[in-house]
Image (cartoon, grey):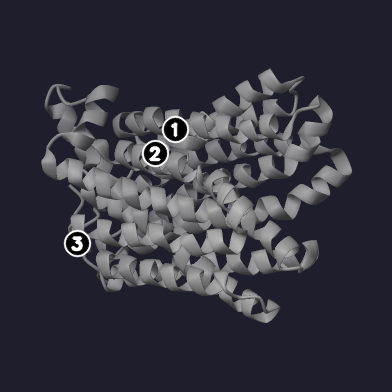
Amino acid sequence: MSASTPLTTTESDAERGYRRKALFAAAIGYGLDGFDLLVLSFALSGIIATFGLSDVRAGSLSTITLFGAVLGGIVFGALADRFGRVRVLTWTVLLFAVFTGLSALAQGYWDLAAYRFIAGIGIGGEFGIGMALAAEAVRADQRARATSWVGVGFQLGVFAAAMVSAPVIALWGWRALFLIGLFPAVFAFVVRRGVSEPETFVRAQTGRDDESGAATGHFGAKLGALIKDRTTVRTTVALTILTSVQNFGYFGIITWLPNYLSGQMGLGVTKGSLWTAVTVLGMLTGILVFGQLADRLGRRPAFWIFQVGAIVSILVYSQMSDPSALLAGGFFMGAFANGMIGGHGALLAEMYPTEVRATAQNVIFNVGRAIGGLAPVVIALLAGSLGFGFALALLPAIYVIQFLAMFLLPEKRGAELT
């Protein structure tokens, strides 16, 4: 089965079954990323109390995890391009699971920071490898929908963490949250046994072997392939802008929205959580709608529709004060601001050849995540002097930059993966 397989009714049950398994593996892998992100947030208050940490030092645990993710994105992306998507995805999940579990045994800040850093290395590999696997496992006409399902996996991971964190902490304390991270180790072995490598990757691997290993490449060569000529540099820069804006908008909204709704808007913690949940539901809906549009209309039109939608919906939302309007507005803001996440997987897959695809996915997305990770700090600084509503109203400016960056990228809807 190749990415260019035409849409016919003769597709075998085995091929359809493989695609479902591959998408499930990719979505669950990225879902662990979302799960870990929120679990750490819920555990921070307990960590602060146990170890007597300042808010700044406790918050640095998230930053340390993010640094590990950037390193993991580079290393595991290159490994996945050499040894296989499914195999290396298994390694990343195992690394994440083991060191997340060890976090429950931490005796102080420094050993916990070390565990978080190494767990972050595992997390860093999951987005790019999962997106590469999904893009290569399906037909070209379904690629954006497939990578959007991987994006849905992240949101479901966030939702799962939100559901289990509070009761687990109430019953057993914050350490139990990290013990839950051991369960993905079982999943890793199931994935390895149940999913083979996509045919697109196998063909590329065979081609490299036929060339006497000359193109096996090392980390430097993989990274160099992302800036090998002027056209590739332009593509890489444009995609880095896209992923940076995507992450900046997401982290900026999801980090401060609960506080904004419960505090400044006077909804209280319970209603603020409900209103935030509706925004997350909008994000899920937006991801699925985006995948359909990107496969039917093309990558550029879909991104432009959602970028304009993000600009308008965030501006309008920042001016709202009525609770009912905030509820509806949050749904649409979430849909447009985060709906594009799955499309990045398809877009990145189509811009780079198979031998560096996972490297490109991981490096570009994790660089964007590192830049986007500054959003909570930037918005907090702006909100401190100008108010959160004003800070939110400034956020659409970054989507204008993203809109312009799309002009630098060719349209490759339905193109064969090389």
Q: CA distance from mark 3 to mark 1?
A: 28 Å
Q: Dot 3 lies on which element?
A: loop
- What mark, if any, has residue 70 been given in the picture? 1
| Residue occupying the point 21% across, 63% down | 414
In this rendering, the answer to whether 112 lies above or below 13 is: above
Q: Amino acid at mark 3?
A: Glu
Q: CA distance from mark 3 to mark 2?
A: 23 Å
Residue 148: x %, y % from top left: 42, 60
**Is 23 displayed left or right of 295 in the figure?**
right
Check contact, mark 1 vs mark 2: CB within 8 A: yes
Camera-side residue of 32 and 56: 56
Q: CA distance from mark 1 to mark 2?
A: 7 Å
Q: Amino acid at mark 1?
A: Val
Q: Amino acid at mark 2?
A: Val
Check contact, mark 3 vs mark 2: CB within 8 A: no
Give the residue pinned by disc 3.
Answer: 411
Q: Would you identify the image quadrant in which residue 215 lies?
A: top left
